[in-house]
Image (cartoon, coloured by chain):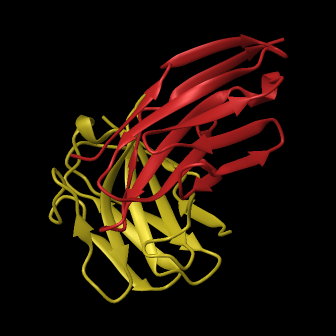
Amino acid sequence: EDQVTQSPEALRLQEGESSSLNCSYTVSGLRGLFWYRQDPGKGPEFLFTLYSAGEEKEKERLKATLTKKESFLHITAPKPEDSATYLCAVGETSYDKVIFGPGTSLSVIP
Amino acid sequence: SAVISQKPSRDICQRGTSLTIQCQVDSQVTMMFWYRQQPGQSLTLIATANQGSEATYESGFVIDKFPISRPNLTFSTLTVSNMSPEDSSIYLCSVGTGVLRGYNEQFFGPGTRLTVL
């Protein structure tokens, strides 16, 4: 059964304290792995799509990496405005939908 | 990218009534999705609505309860029928774009916050 888990459930960082969020997945054939940011009361905001193991993508303080079993979202020198819930989702090759993980709630303290 | 709007942004409804949520996209897209997000939870797919075909519902969701229309490539509606307090949630419209099977990227609307009394 296709499955997506994320850890930690919640993360509290001091401003400037770098860390990583984990997304572990089980899928028969990976079509793509997606990262989103969601602010309270808003819809998810698309960040990255990763397609194959070894691929990396960067956007400002965020860097996403992918292996055959997991993805990491690295946050370098975070700022309070990076506080949000980060969602991971995977798409399988045989269907159009994606499966979302439970998310990691990130708080960056000034 | 795609810009998505939803109406209404929020509503408070009485038990037993129905609410229709509208989703408008600023470009033509084939694939549209409707999600539900309960407080503090992740996203649960309700159905996939591709233009020109019947909506495909996920396990636990039925057409009688959540009828969907997809009249063209930029618009869709989701109706929440015969509502109960358990239907209180955020409902999100989403579109998939790209050229690979399925899509490369998925964009979301701002959501409709529904409270059922």
At horizontal 54% and vertical 80% (from top left) the residue drawn is B99
Q: Position of residue B72 (x, y in %)?
A: 45, 87
Q: Is residue A89 left or right of residue A60?
A: left
State which quarter of the image contains the C terminus of chain A: top right
Q: Position of residue A58 (x, y in %)?
A: 76, 46
Asked whether residue A43 appears in the rendered view, the answer is: no
Q: Position of residue A3 (x, y in %)?
A: 31, 41
Q: Is residue B44 left or right of residue A108?
A: left
Vertical arrangement, residue B22 with respect to residue B13, above or below:
below
In the foreground, A74 or A81: A74
At horizontal 33% and vertical 77% (from top left) the residue drawn is B69
Q: Which chain is rendered red in the image?
A: A
At horizontal 32% and vertical 50% (from top left) the residue drawn is A27
At horizontal 49% and vertical 78% (from top left) the residue drawn is B75
Asked whether residue B92 appears in the rendered view, the answer is: yes
Vertical arrangement, residue B9 with respect to residue B48, above or below:
above
Residue A31 falls in image quadrant: bottom left
Q: Is residue B30 left or right of residue A46?
A: left
Residue B62 falls in image quadrant: bottom left
In the foreground, A65 or A60: A65
